[in-house]
Amino acid sequence: MDILIGKIKQKNNPTVVGLDPLLDYVPNFIKQKAFKEYGKNFEGASNAILEYNKGLIDNLYDIVPAVKPQSAYYEMYGYEGVKALYETIKYAKEKGLYVIADIKRNDIGSTAQAYAKAYLGKTQIENESLSAFNADSITVNGYLGVDGITPFINECKQYDKSMFILVKTSNHSSGELQDLMLNDNDKVYIKMAKLVENWGKDTIGKHGYSQVGAVVGATYPEQLKELRQKFKNMFFLVPGYGAQGGGASDVAFSFDSNGLGAIINSSRAISCAYKKENCSEQDFAGVARREALKMKKELNEVLMG
Amino acid sequence: MDILIGKIKQKNNPTVVGLDPLLDYVPNFIKQKAFKEYGKNFEGASNAILEYNKGLIDNLYDIVPAVKPQSAYYEMYGYEGVKALYETIKYAKEKGLYVIADIKRNDIGSTAQAYAKAYLGKTQIENESLSAFNADSITVNGYLGVDGITPFINECKQYDKSMFILVKTSNHSSGELQDLMLNDNDKVYIKMAKLVENWGKDTIGKHGYSQVGAVVGATYPEQLKELRQKFKNMFFLVPGYGAQGGGASDVAFSFDSNGLGAIINSSRAISCAYKKENCSEQDFAGVARREALKMKKELNEVLMG
């Protein structure tokens, strides 16, 4: 997690911008240009979302440390969309951004290994060793236990990458399973956090955080507070800020006394800010930048609080 | 689930063949031909796995009702691999096979909707409505609760498709979370099964099974038996047969008194049988067919037993 923390300190900004490019979010002038060149099909749509992402990245890379493309919004445009995901990751990394691929993958050991190679490590093709997606970090679902986690940890160790396991998710129904009480008086999400802590215990870096972090929603500030207090070595990826309803005071609990320990995600509230402000869509990236600077200011006020 | 059940009855065979085309599994003559044409890269690898899959499908489509491509083994070859997944699904459907895309996706509602459109439904591009992957069925992880499930159910209803939610997975460490006892004396996997039952309760078809099924591993026959007895309307996708250690007597419990209620997956034991038999790799598909017929016979003996 040290690379991410280094970038957060460098930019003085614990924000990750979600890149969830549903076609409805893409400014019309970008869409029409792509449709004209490639057609109203997956190729046209994928070129449009890549162009949109590049515009956002160009206007954000010097003020935010990280971006988080959400795989679903690329997969829905078929393999062409997945190519746009690959190109987005590549472009963001070239700009010095830390890329968290939000894929929430999970499977039994042998299959988890294939995912781990795809997103964090390398794929062997005879004597060639190639990177399929080469993200810096990913999200993972831990329902299958350690077998499904170890392959990801191995790639994290080998390539100095990181991962975030779902602990307490930001959605309304997350409690349906995650908040159930176990007979040893832990809730399921606390048990999951204990597993995460144990899985990552030999990957703790110079800032005191493990390479195996946790996803904890901004929409559950009490749980965020509880988890921060109990799991000192666990870095949090915190979605749910902005469009989902979490505010700066809610996420304040996710940081340690040095102002580290968490990165806060905002997606639509930044990337679609141009729609709310009712400004020129030509200025979508400028508006996103202003919104990101506003969020940086809000978070820094809380941190100095 | 009626379409799948219809195909099972037609072929008199409750088997789904896993298509997990790790490059090591692909016969050398297919690989070398693809590498010569496209290079030792993701394009070459992806063309090799597609060729391998087509050979398997050509020799299996008249004896098995379904195939289950595991997404990880395509994603590890980048977007070209994902294109091979798309082509595999398309080819298998053209041959009349029911295709279960083993993707284990999961996310909050808005994102789950993107996945649901990608794999079961259609993606809107202006006034065009296009299918990205168009599988018949998928696997899903239910850790996030109903918000993350409803979008998939909606697509199942609209397009007469199905889904399988992870309940008790086949891997060694599945109990780490899934077997924990809740304070109401249900284990986590039983609670998950209860959620699955409730989520699917208004999608029950003419054979008495819901469109929302469950993944239950062949490696846990006691749990399989317990779940079969408790959840009469729940169709099971049962991995873990063959290479992972589950046998015909283990999966016997997954069927109802009419011999329905489950489909048993075998991947490597069929697709890589040519390696075990030490036969000509040119005959990989013929060997796979013999192995599939052997499995059909084993399962039918159990069903008649």
Image (tube, coloured by chain):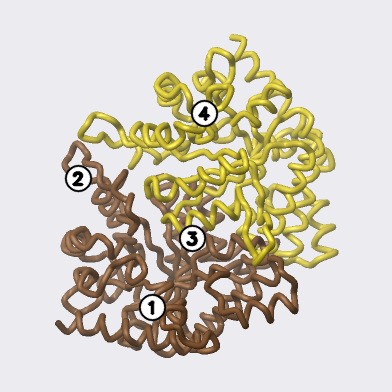
Chain colours: A yellow, B brown
Give residue B218's quadrant in the image. bottom left
At a point 62% along the width and 65% down the height, the residue shown is B82
What is the distance, in whole Å, between disc 3 and disc 2 at their CAs?
Answer: 27 Å
Identity of the amino acid at label 4? Ile
In the rendered structure, the residue with mark 4 lies on which chain?
A: A
Q: Name the residue under label 3.
A: B103
- Disc nearer the start of the sequence (3/2): 3
Residue type at mark 2 is: Asp
Residue B258 placement: quadrant: bottom left
* Location of mark 1 (residue): B3
Chain identifier of the residue bearing label 3 in the image: B
**Dot 3 amino acid type:** Ile
Secondary structure of the residue carrying numbered label 3: strand
Judging depth in this view, the residue of B44 and A173 nearest the camera is B44
Crowding near the residue tagged with mark 3, few <14, some 14–19, many ≥20 C-alpha atoms within 10 Å: many
Give whichever of A78, A210 is nearer the camera: A210
Horizontal and vertical percent for residue B187? 22, 46
